[in-house]
Amino acid sequence: MKRTVLTLAVVAAVVAAAAAVTLSVLSTDPAPAPAPSRTPDGRPPAIATSTGPFQAGPVAPPVSGSYLGAWVRPERLTESGRLTAMTTWEEALGRPMAIVNTYRRFDENFFNDSDRSFAGRGTTLMLSWAGGDTRLVTMGRYDELIRERARELRSFGRPVLLRYRWEMDRPNLRAQMWSGEDYVAAWRHVRRIFTEEGATNASWVWCPTAEGFTGGYAAGFYPGDDAVDWTCVDVYAGSKYATIGQLMRPFLEFCAAHPAKPVMIGEFGVARTWGTDQRAAWLRDASATFKANPQIRAVLYFESDPTDNKGPTQQFQLSDDPVLLATFRAEIAQDPHYTPMTKTRPAPLRQPRK
């Protein structure tokens, strides 16, 4: 998704792109039957069923259930606007968010006053960090910048989720990513520098798009179980309406092959274009799918109508529709499956001085 975010400290250039899987017209074999999207009793299929133990880094998953988080776009793009937006969202849902997502350019400082306010109340931050040209990264062009960010993270001290160059599989990023191999090399280069600087208080979140798994090219960007703490996907019912289980089935199959990694839904949303009834049904199905796949341990809604994404297929805000807000509150926010972070959040890490 392409978003308009805080000019002060929350910036990302994100454009959704779909990847199509096409059958050859020359083939004489019948098309394979699609995988069922429901079990015989009508429930979403259980695919990613691992319950651990998980190797998740400093931000451990809940003992059971799932954390709930969000990105909430402020009406005013200021620090106070960001705090107000999140507070209003949480009051409407009747609970705090366990995780707050925020976006950063590659050359932008990680933390500001609003981040420290969220962290001070026990919320875990997820830094969606844009990254740079992968080949320039591995050549060492940005090493000093990376070290500065690592030292900033170390000084922050608290455990955070670091979603380095999320949605790297998007077609519009290919010129910057070069290839899956280049992305993996850059990921490992950056993480090595963070370790050298003592910035070990981040869980590294690898997060392609659902379309990338459907198209068969997202997995080529995977840095490996030894370099990833959480696996993640961004999934939307935007210009195409399908259940979340259908949209992310290939991703869940990937996760099932990596049972030691907890799963995060880094962004999910259903577009305004589908109307209240279909959107409400989609949210109910999303919650059922999350519960059917216990490897999913964190889900974050994308509560935003980005001003630079024109049209209702790119608008995902729920809070302006009372029926949808009530559905989200009943089916997700107030369901005990979505554990508040404060019950199991690890204590802040104390990093050694250098």
Image (cartoon, grey):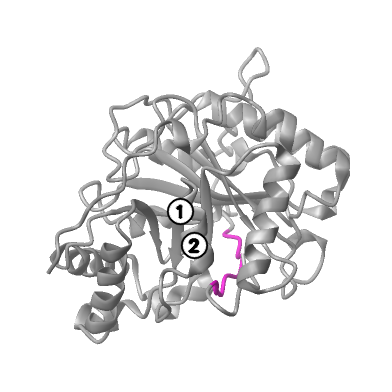
**Mark 2 residue element:** helix
Q: Is residue 52 above or below residue 234?
A: above
- Return the residue at label 1: 119
Q: Nearer the viewer, residue 312 or 18?
A: 312
Label 1 to label 2: alpha-carbon separation:
6 Å
Q: Position of residue 181 (x, y in %)?
A: 27, 66
User: In which quarter of the view is residue 220 placed?
Assistant: bottom left
Task: Please identify the quadrant where the C terminus is shown.
Answer: bottom left
Task: Please identify the quadrant where the N terminus is shown.
Answer: bottom right
Q: Nearer the viewer, residue 106 or 272?
A: 106
Q: Position of residue 59 (x, y in %)?
A: 34, 44
Seen at 33% across and 65% down, the residue is 180
Q: Position of residue 289 (x, y in %)?
A: 59, 30
Region in magenta = 10-19
- Return the residue at label 2: 115
**Mark 1 residue element:** helix
Seen at 32% across and 32% down, the residue is 259
Query: For the residue carrying disc 2, how many other residues have a C-alpha within 10 Å: few (<14), some (14-19), or many (20+)?
Result: many
**354 in magenta:** no
Q: Is residue 215 visible?
A: no
Amino acid type assigned to the residue bearing label 2 in the image: Asp
Q: Looking at the rendered structure, which numbered label has been put on residue 339?
A: none
Q: Position of residue 182 (x, y in %)?
A: 28, 71
User: In which quarter of the view is residue 72 placed?
Assistant: bottom right
Amino acid type assigned to the residue bearing label 1 in the image: Ala
Left or right placement of residue 328 versus residue 345 in this view? right
Seen at 44% across and 75% down, the residue is 174
**11 in magenta:** yes
Q: Is residue 279 above or below residue 191?
A: above
Q: Check contact, mark 1 vs mark 2: CB within 8 A.
A: yes
